[in-house]
Amino acid sequence: MTAPTTRFLDDLRAFADAEGVRDAKLARPMGLLSDALGRVVPVADHPDQPSQPVVDTNLAAALDAAVGTPGDLIRAVVDLVGWAIPYPEYAGEPDMDAMRANYAYAPIIGAAEDAISAGAVSAPYLSDEVFVGLVLQGPGCDYPSHVHKSEEVFWVTAGTADWQKGDEWRVDEPGAVIHHPSGTRHATVTRDEPLLMLFAWVSDADSIPVIVRH
Ligand SMILES: [Fe+2]
């Protein structure tokens, strides 16, 4: 297990700054991320972290396929992170049991106690201001509509999927950048490939997502 480095934080901050320049709609959220990154602390004795079956099955191929600077950032940090299953409070609901069997996330920068998994994983870098991590969603996985207060940016590095934002559906491919302002309803349905993404919550880092039931 390698230790977290400030080099990764520097590279992520440079990427956030570049994204804010590239796309005017990202200027404000990337400004929030870049500013907070200046206060992130590496964990000196970060313990070994758990994996998950969906990760053991799909991560290697998704890493090989991961495109762009976000793909490079993921490869630089992936050996440090642990994987958790969200929505433990929805266990027993059939659609969520199916989703939770085929989806995992990994905190990179987060709170000392991961709120979504009730502490099942811990981030190698600490921040109470932003939550940065990975998502791996296996093939044929329906992640239902959900909302959270956090303002969110996703960088898709591998996998083509169907995405809902508000009431609109579209298809996003590797290289896509997806911005959800606070409270935006969204959903993701994978096809025949695993979806690997870098995400950043740039506000309300302790939010717990809530599924939208019709
Ligand atoms: Fe989200």
Image (cartoon, rainbow, N blue to C red):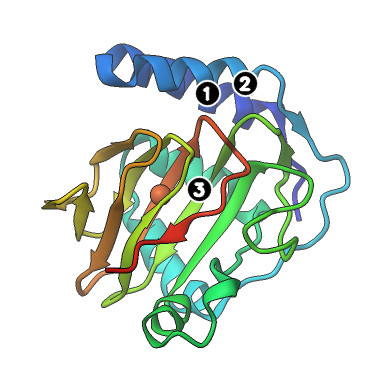
- Quarter of the image where the N terminus is located: bottom right
Describe residue 146's horizontal placement relative to residue 214 as left or right: right
Ligand 1: does it lie within 8 Å of the C-beta at label 3? no
Residue at (59%, 46%) from the top-left corner?
A: 77
Residue at (41%, 72%) from the top-left corner?
A: 58
| Furthest residue toward front | 214
The residue mark sitting in front, 2 or 3, is 2
- Residue where numbered disc 3 is placed: 75
Q: Observer-nearest residue: 187 or 89?
A: 89
The type of residue carrying mark 3 is: Arg
* Picture disc at residue 36: 2
Q: Observer-nearest residue: 90 or 75?
A: 90
> Mark 3 and mark 1 in contact (Cβ < 8 Å)?
no
How crowded pointer 2 is (Cα within 10 Å; few <14, some 14-19, many 20+) is rated as some
> Mark 1 and mark 2 in contact (Cβ < 8 Å)?
yes
Q: Quadrant of residue 122?
A: bottom right
* Picture disc at residue 33: 1
**Percent x, y for residue 112?**
79, 46
Q: Quadrant of residue 17?
A: top left
Residue at (54%, 68%) from the top-left corner?
A: 87
Q: Observer-nearest residue: 108 or 33?
A: 33
